[in-house]
């Protein structure tokens, strides 16, 4: 269990603890006390079990919805960490090594220091509990057996699989129980053993603790406190849950003897009251918690009717379902799932499904209707769910292309196929899957790669967001053109957007690292003469394990590490001011999952995910 897992568990449990505390504030004397024992048990599971059960009733579904609305899922963009900039916003290869060393040192500190603090706090608190328990056991083990006929008879009337012993000690002032598997009821030597009515109340109280394994429950509370010692709400839970264990036990005693015994039991509680025992966890104290709260609860006790029990169960169930569970997995690919059947990480595409709502995405005829229901775009492929309703011929054809939004000019042809993937409410659904392909070549995308050109390396739908997907459906001797916007493209790239504050003059404001390509683009506010060349840059790619790859461009031209050859091209549009550089990795590719950071002109960008 790492520190971040603990933090996530603690934060999610905090919400549940707060809700339980509010319910307790208003319902402590209205609901059965067992209700709160169950509540705290659920909270304990949330604090100690490092996973949660998803539920459609979870409040975190709404949280995810709000966060998704205001912070939609982005591409794998990184954020700058501790920007390190020199006067020229450039960096030498040796400087890159120094920056990387600093970054690794910073990463190590930022991960080790919080972990060390957490472990220290947990160890100190655990040591306190263990020492307190050990000291208590030393005292309790000096207790002597009690040879009392009434006590022996009472034990015989209350058999239990675990062996229970009753002992007495002159070092305690009120009864207590300790031990889990071999429990001991420890009574004060000063107790009046001739008052059998009072003894029955005391022994019943302690027996209920034993049957319910309350000592184990308190150890679990202590364990949760040790793990989450930094969370003030867990301290609140520790105090309130310990009180509720006693309140529930008191309620069970009154229920056993009847409401006529409330006064006698309250007087017994007052007589046994002892201060200053709130931290001991090795036993169940007869009067551990605030006596006033317990007496008030005893005197207000009323047997819960059927509907009160139902309400209690419903409250626990709904609260647990809402606050102790996690959001349900919403990233479902739906009808696109078969397109990614061989991809073990296919859920990453789900956030890129688009609903096609434009008028151009559907055609309605007297006998049938055709529409693009939804789309999904990646760097090299376009997917569309096509719905057909009505008297549609069994066989039909679909061809596609990507076109500029403001003209009929083709950007890419699409080479693909279509197959039926389901039906619902009389609508048949078909999945159209296609590769982007060069315009007018008559070859599909895979054939282009096999022929040895770099079409798929240099081209991506991500570079053409805002264009249109145009599908031509041919059926019954007629053609229908459906169109929708290319948007929300999933790209296999790490995208960085450097800050202008780090530069004086033109710079590349978008850098996309792909497995076999580094694409950079920028916008110039001034006019350049013929022969313009792009800005200098220095980039270090940091891989898992500390491996570094250096790529740069300066007065020497392109520079790169031995073993990582590149070829580059650059261009400038004097009409728009847009410029770009495209670096082709010759004979090698990157596994983007191994990229941990990218250093761009002295600024460190850590890669998430």
Image (cartoon, rainbow, N blue to C red):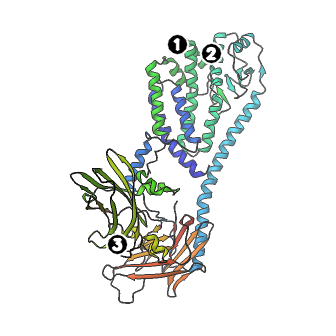
- Please name the residue that numbered disc 3 is placed on: 411
Determine contact: label 3, label 2, CB under 8 Å.
Answer: no
- Whichever of callouts 3 and 1 sits on the residue coming sooner in the sequence is 1
Res. 382 visible in picture: no
- The residue lying at 53 percent from left, 26 percent from top is 34
Q: Is residue 352 magenta?
A: no
Which residue: 57% across, 72% down?
99
Q: Pick whichever, 325 or 210, lies toward us.
A: 325
Inspect the magenta stretch and tell me whether residue 488 lies in it.
yes
Residue 270, image quadrant:
top right
**Residue 201 bears which disc, if any?**
2
Where are the magenta residues, as a range? 485-493
Residue 575 seen in render: yes
* Residue placed under numbered mark 1 in the picture: 259
Identify which residue, 359 or 566, lies in the foreground.
359
Q: Earlier along the polypeptide chain: callout 2 or callout 1?
A: 2
Q: Please state the horizontal and vertical placement of residue 444, each as a whole percent of the image.
A: 42, 70
Q: Quadrant of residue 417?
A: bottom left
Mark 3 surroundings: few (<14), some (14-19) or many (≥20) residues within 10 A:
some
């Amino acid at each position: 269990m790492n520190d971040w897992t603990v933090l996530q568990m603690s934060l999610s449990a905090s919400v549940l603890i707060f809700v339980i505390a509010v319910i307790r504030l208003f319902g402590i004397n209205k609901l059965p006390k067992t209700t709160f024992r169950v509540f705290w048990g659920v909270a304990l599971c949330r604090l100690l079990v490092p996973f949660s059960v998803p539920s459609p009733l979870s409040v975190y579904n709404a949280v995810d919805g709000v966060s998704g609305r205001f912070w939609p899922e982005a591409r794998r963009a990184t954020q700058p960490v501790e920007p390190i900039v020199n006067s020229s916003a450039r960096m030498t290869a040796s400087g890159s090594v120094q920056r990387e060393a600093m970054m690794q040192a910073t990463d190590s500190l930022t991960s080790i220091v919080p972990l060390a603090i957490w472990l220290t706090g947990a160890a100190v608190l655990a040591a306190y509990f263990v020492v307190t328990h050990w000291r208590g056991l030393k005292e309790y083990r000096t207790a002597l057996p009690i040879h009392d006929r009434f006590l022996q008879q009472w034990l015989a009337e209350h058999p239990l699989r675990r062996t229970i012993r009753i002992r007495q000690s002159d070092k305690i002032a009120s009864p207590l129980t300790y031990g889990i598997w071999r429990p001991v009821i420890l009574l004060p030597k000063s107790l009046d053993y001739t008052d059998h009515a009072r003894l029955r109340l005391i022994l019943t109280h302690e027996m209920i603790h034993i049957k319910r394994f309350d000592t184990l429950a308190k150890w679990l509370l202590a364990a949760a406190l040790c793990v989450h010692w930094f969370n003030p709400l867990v301290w609140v839970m520790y105090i309130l849950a310990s009180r509720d264990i006693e309140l529930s036990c008191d309620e069970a005693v009154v229920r056993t003897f009847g409401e006529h015994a409330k006064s006698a039991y309250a007087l017994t509680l007052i007589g046994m009251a002892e201060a200053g025992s709130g931290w001991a966890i090795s036993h169940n104290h007869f009067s551990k918690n605030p006596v006033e709260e317990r007496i008030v609860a005893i005197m207000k006790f009323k047997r819960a009717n059927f509907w009160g029990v139902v309400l209690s169960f419903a409250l626990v169930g709904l609260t647990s379902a809402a606050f102790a569970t996690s959001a349900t997995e919403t990233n479902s690919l739906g009808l696109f799932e078969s397109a990614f059947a061989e991809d073990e990480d296919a859920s990453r595409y789900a956030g890129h499904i688009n609903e096609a709502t434009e008028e151009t995405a559907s055609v309605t005829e007297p006998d049938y209707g055709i529409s693009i229901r939804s789309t999904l775009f990646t760097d090299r492929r376009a997917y569309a769910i096509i719905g057909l309703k009505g008297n549609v011929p069994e066989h039909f054809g679909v061809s596609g292309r990507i076109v500029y939004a403001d003209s009929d000019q083709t950007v890419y042809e699409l080479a693909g196929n279509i197959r039926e993937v389901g039906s619902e409410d009389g609508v048949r659904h078909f999945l159209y899957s296609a590769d982007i392909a060069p315009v007018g070549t008559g070859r599909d995308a895979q054939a282009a790669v096999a022929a040895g050109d770099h079409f798929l390396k240099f081209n991506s739908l991500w570079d053409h967001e805002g264009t249109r997907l145009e599908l031509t459906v041919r059926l019954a001797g007629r053609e229908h053109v459906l169109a929708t916007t290319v948007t929300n493209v999933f790209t296999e790239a790490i995208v960085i957007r450097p800050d202008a504050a780090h530069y004086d003059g033109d710079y590349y404001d978008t850098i996309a690292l792909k497995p076999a390509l580094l694409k950079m683009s920028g916008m110039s506010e001034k006019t350049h003469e013929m022969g313009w060349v792009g800005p200098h840059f220095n980039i270090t790619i940091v891989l898992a394990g500390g491996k570094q790859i250096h790529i740069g461009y300066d007065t020497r031209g392109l520079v790169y590490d031995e073993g990582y050859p590149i070829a580059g091209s650059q261009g400038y549009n004097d009409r728009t001011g847009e410029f770009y550089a495209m670096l082709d990795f010759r004979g090698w590719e990157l596994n983007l999952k191994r990229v941990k950071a990218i250093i761009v002109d002295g600024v460190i960008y850590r890669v998430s995910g």
